[in-house]
Amino acid sequence: MKSSISKVTKAYLKQLEADEKAGKPTEEYTHDPDTLDRLIKENSLRIAGLHFYPELDLMLIVLSNKRIIQRKLSDFSRLKTATLQQLQAYQISRYGIHWPQIDEDLSLKGFLQEELMALVA
């Protein structure tokens, strides 16, 4: 199946490339944000910190609104096999968490989607 890119996205990518060549700062791109995107942006919601308990198969994600999300490390194959030192070598961005040593990325939006699905299940 051939993938297609919308005209809006093509135009954005072309402008982004031109801006990068000109050394201009780029703006964040979100096409047609959904409810979770708006929730994150309007409330300046971010991941504030992480805590790991490998012996309990547990990761705690602390959010900027003081809420805590719990996840099993074993739900993520790369996290499940990582050492504590590798787990603690993460980087937090506005979108989520990145572990350079184990090449893993998890998004804030993904965590929130899982929380919502657990509520309705």
Image (spheres, rainbow, N blue to C red):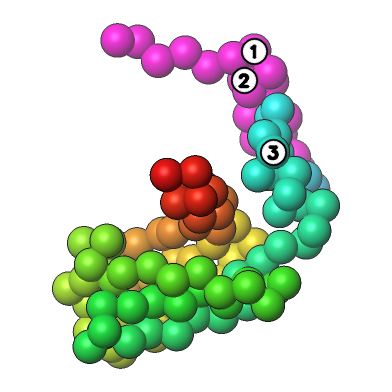
Quadrant in which the C terminus is drawn: top left
Q: As rendered, which of 81 and 3 lies closer to the eye?
A: 81
Residue 50, x across and y down, in percent = 49, 80
- Please tell me which of labels 3 and 1 falls first in the chain: 1
How far is mark 3 from mark 2, CA to CA? 24 Å
Question: Which residue in the structure is indicated by mark 3?
Answer: 35
Question: Which residue in the structure is indicated by mark 2?
Answer: 10
Q: For mark 3, does the 10 Å Cα neighbourhood hold few (<14), some (14 to 19), or many (20 or more) residues?
A: few
- Please tell me whether mark 3 sits on a helix, a strand or a loop: helix
Residue 98, x across and y down, in percent = 44, 66
Residue 94, placed above or below residue 67: above
Residue at horizontal 62%, vertical 20%? Answer: 10
Say whether residue 24 is magenta.
no
The disc at residue 7 is 1
> Viewed as shown, does residue 40 lie left or right of 49?
right
Residue at horizontal 78%, vertical 61%? Answer: 44
Disc 1, disc 2: CB below 8 Å? yes
Q: Amino acid at mark 3?
A: Thr
- Please tell me whether mark 1 sits on a helix, a strand or a loop: helix
Q: For mark 2, does the 10 Å Cα neighbourhood hold few (<14), some (14 to 19), or many (20 or more) residues?
A: few
- Please tell me whether mark 2 sits on a helix, a strand or a loop: helix
Q: Amino acid at mark 1?
A: Lys
Disc 3, disc 2: CB below 8 Å? no
How far is mark 3 from mark 1, CA to CA? 23 Å
The image quarter in which residue 57 lies? bottom left
- The magenta-colored residue range is 1-23
> Viewed as shown, does residue 92 lie left or right of 71?
right
The image quarter in which residue 103 lies? bottom left
